[in-house]
Amino acid sequence: MIEKDFVTEGLKRTRIDEFLESELERAGYGGMEIQVTPLGTMVVVYAERPGMVIGRGGKTVRAITQQLKNDYDLENP
């Protein structure tokens, strides 16, 4: 059913958006885009302070990537 796929994808995007909003509140989270590519899933995050999203040595972005992969079943985010 095509309609069911649209609904489940919309719910998945909303859950990911709410997760990122709670995780990146201090960084000035402004939204996100999800694009599915042949190599994996590309998540583009808009924030006022991108340095806080990346973290020292990329620590924060790696932790968020692991959570997206494990909790939300994104392929190679």
Image (tube, rainbow, N blue to C red):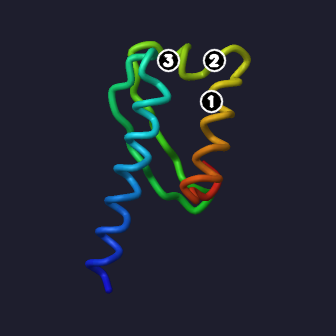
Separation of disc 1 and disc 3 at Cα?
Answer: 10 Å
Q: Is residue 35 left or right of residue 66?
A: left
* Quarter assignment of residue 74: bottom right
Image coordinates for residue 28, horizontal then vertical, percent = 38, 17
Q: Is residue 48 above or below residue 15?
A: above
Question: Which residue lies at the image location 37% right of the left edge and 63% below the top edge?
Answer: 9
**Dot 3: few (<14), some (14–19), or many (≥20) neighbours within 10 Å?**
some
Q: Are marks 2 and 1 in contact (CB under 8 Å)?
A: yes
- Up-down relation of residue 4 to residue 7 (above or below): below
**Earlier along the polypeptide chain: callout 2 or callout 1?**
2
Q: Residue 26's x, y, as percent?
A: 44, 15
Q: Which residue is at the front of the view, 66 or 48? A: 66
Q: Position of residue 27 (x, y in %)?
A: 45, 16
**Other residues around mark 2 within 10 Å, as few (<14) / some (14–19) / many (≥20):** few
- The residue labelled by disc 1 is 61
Front one among 46 and 15: 15
- Front: mark 3 or 2: 2
Residue carrying label 3: 50
Q: Quadrant of residue 63?
A: top right
Which residue bears the numbered disc 2?
55
Q: Amino acid at mark 3?
A: Pro
Query: Real-space Cα distance between discs 3 and 2?
Result: 9 Å
Q: Earlier in the sequence, mark 3 or mark 2?
A: 3
Kind of residue indicated by mark 1: Val
**Residue drawn at (40%, 22%) of the image:** 47
Q: Quadrant of the N terminus?
A: bottom left
User: Quick one: label 1 or label 3, which is nearer the N terminus?
Assistant: 3
